[in-house]
Image (spheres, rainbow, N blue to C red):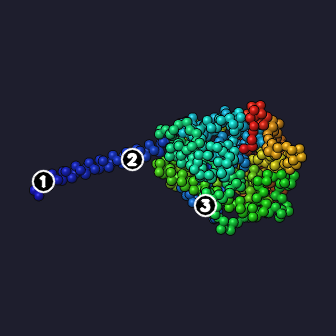
Amino acid sequence: MNKKLRIYHTKAFRFILQLCILILISVLSNQEIYAQNKSTERPNIIFILTDDHRYDLLGCTGNEIIQTPHLDKLAADGILFTNAHVTSAICTPSRASIFLSQFERKHGVNFNSGTSVSADAWGDSYPVVLRKNGYYTGYIGKNHVPIGVGGYKSGVMEASFDYWYAAHGHLLFYPKERHEIFNGAVNDTQVEILGEGVTDFLTNEHKLQGAKHFLTRIPKDKPFCMSINFNLPHGASTSTMKMHPTDPETYKTLYRDKEIPLPKYYKEKKEIKSPKLPTELLHVNDRQNIYDFVDNEQDLRERIIRNMQAVTGIDALVGNLRKTLTEQNLDKNTIIIFTSDHGIFWGENGLGGKALCYEVCTRVPMIIYDPNAPKRSRGIKSDQLVQTIDLAPTMLAFAAAPIPKSYQGKPLNDLINGKDIPVREVLFTENLWSTHFGNPRCEAVQDKDWKYIRYYKNENLSAQYLIDTAKKYNVNMTSMLYANHDPQIAIYQSFIEGPLNGESAVYEELYNLKNDADEQYNLANSTAYADKLNELRNIWYKTIRQARGNDAMNVVRYTTDSEAERAHLVKPE
């Protein structure tokens, strides 16, 4: 090759090399700009809420039998909160607290309150705030919070979402038996029906028969927030499992070959000699019969199996959800939050039901996964004191939306990003669902080491007496036990205001959670812990006032009487 030709080839090579370098720089620069743009986009948010889901009913929380690989993976990819609590351990007030980021004694809605959340107050709920701030919102599953004038029949909640595939009250295991909206689903079982709604929403098909939506597709320029609300593993659903031939195999055979351990301090009804709480305080014989499965080992084991089957079904839905997110190229910018509305007793110390302020009722699993969180914060377990009222402000913070002044929870975003900063020094829980079904009113304050619970006089009429009276006079049993009449509003209000106005506790408990996590040894009467008891009493005095706040409750009348005036029949939901 002559000299001129070599020079030509050398110059050509250099030109091509320089061109390649420029192209590479341009590509990398564009990728960086794209990544920066992606990081500044507002994220999609998926909120998943289970029902009656104990903290110990996941693999990642220590259960060695249950199969929850997808939720375990979610925890490994995100953050698992090991000290997360609800504010009220019963469905309606807890779910209202999640929506509104308020303690019950501020939002003022329960089964026995005679009220529903006003449309004005609902305007500050996390889904409405997100929608006002440009989010496309969807709601799938169970609603158990009455909203607006007319409560469940007001239509306010349905109109608050862009996509609605849900029903009010219990869904049962086979939702088509109770709710017409689900009749167009291919499946018959609850988890799988809701899964169809999730897929319909995420794939942007909006073709599912029965689903209500105001737009045919999610606008490309809008992020979304989808709330998925199960009625599982709640007993209203697991008790109706029939193992139909068409049911997925999970709900028929899974765990039936396992030896199912019972809770450490389980007591059969026949073995109870000394009740956990004084009989004049907790009227055990008036407990709703839906919780009688705790009375003997055989029935309890059967219910535990069903609960585990249901949670494994939910876990599969979470797996399918994450797979769909990846297929739709949504996984890099979608936050997933998972928790429950409360736990439930499994016969610990002979107790059944929920509502009380013990750990097994108030402590719930909570997982938050942010794909854009720093790697150092992935897979960590946080024992900071957090509550479900913290989730609404957390979602709004993710969305860069304004947080209403009415909110009492605190954003958890610093924790999610790896900063181990305490959210609060103490947390407050309460039970205002004190009715003829036997539960007393109570409140609790706790830090990481100690818990103080105080109880008030239980003067409610006996459920058994009401049942006997209904039979005697041929009164409708549902009406006798579940109708809320106007005087109930005043009774409920007295429950809220009594402790603030000097009502004395009739019984107290003090537990050293660090040494007695199962709350077996009440130290309230021990002189050795008198100082600690007084310290927590003083903390309770301040905390209950903070929980109540200074504003009037923003509720509307919702009773059997109010709906009779509107010619509507109120059915227990």
Q: Nearer the viewer, mark 3 or mark 1?
A: 3
Residue 185 x %, y % = 58, 48
Residue 89 x %, y % = 72, 49
Asked whether residue 208 is in view, the answer is yes
Judged from this view, the residue extending furthest toward the right is 472
**Residue at numbered disc 3:** 249
**Residue kind at label 2, given as amino acid type:** Gln
**Residue at numbered disc 1:** 5
Mark 1 residue crowding within 10 angstroms, few (<14) / some (14–19) / many (20+): few
Judged from this view, the residue extending furthest toward the left is 2
Q: What whole-number distance in Å separates the C-alpha atoms at marks 2 and 1?
A: 39 Å
Closer to the chain start, of discs 2 and 1, is 1
Q: Write the residue at 47% across / 38% down.
A: 221
Report the side of 202 relative to 496 (left or right).
left
Residue 73 x %, y % = 55, 58
- SS category of the residue bearing label 3: loop
Report the side of 381 relative to 115 (left or right).
left
Q: Quadrant of residue 167?
A: top right
Q: Nearer the viewer, residue 242 or 374?
A: 242
Q: Which mark is residue 31?
A: 2
